[in-house]
Image (cartoon, helix red, strand yellow):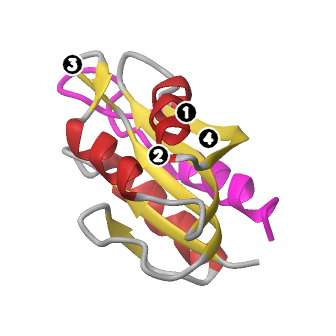
Amino acid sequence: MTYAVRYYTKTGNTKRLAEAIAKELGVEALPISTPVTEKVDYLFLGNSYYAFDIDPEVKAFVGSLGKDKVGKIVNFGSAAMLNSTWKKIKAEADKAGVAMDEKEFHCRGEFKFLHKGRPNADDVKAAVEFARQYK
């Protein structure tokens, strides 16, 4: 199996998860500003809600993907309020013709006074265990 890890973060929370997942998979976690140029079986895509939607940069990134480069997107992320971005990412992936894995990883993320210290060590460990099932 081949992997890539890309993430979008404004707070650094999702980056922490991306780096742990990438280490487990033996690849480098890169921001979405770095395109996927190699063919991968799984693209682990870290993102979150901002103003009740995924960021336009994330939408553009997913739109730039093609099924000739990415087998499946595996969604992961952290958020203080809303949970899963899976449906939003799936809608963009459908437009791009890229499959989505049914499973995803999500945990709380710290934002201002909410969920202080999250993602914490247990969250990072859970993200690694989630990624391990793809090896």
Q: Which amino acid, by three-letter code, is at mark 4?
A: Phe
Choose top left, top right, bottom left or bottom right for residue 111: top left
The residue lying toward the viewer, choosing from 74 and 60, is: 60
Q: Residue 50, image x and y in percent?
A: 24, 26
Q: What element carries label 1?
A: helix
The residue lying toward the viewer, choosing from 18 and 108, is: 18
Q: Which amino acid, by three-letter code, is at mark 3?
A: Ala
Choose top left, top right, bottom left or bottom right for residue 31: bottom left
Earlier along the polypeptide chain: callout 4 or callout 1?
A: 1
Question: Which residue corresponds to the image point at 55% horizontal and 70% vertical from the top-left?
Answer: 69
The residue identified by callout 4 is 105
Q: How crowded is mark 1: few (under 14 residues within 10 Å), some or many (20 or more)?
A: many
Question: Which residue corresponds to the image point at 50% horizontal and 29% vertical from the top-left?
Answer: 91
* Segment colored magenta: 108-135
Of the 4 image quadrants, the one containing the N terminus is: bottom right
Q: Distance between the residues labelled 2 and 4?
A: 14 Å
Evaluate if marks 3 and 4 touch, with contact meaning CB atoms under 8 Å apart.
no
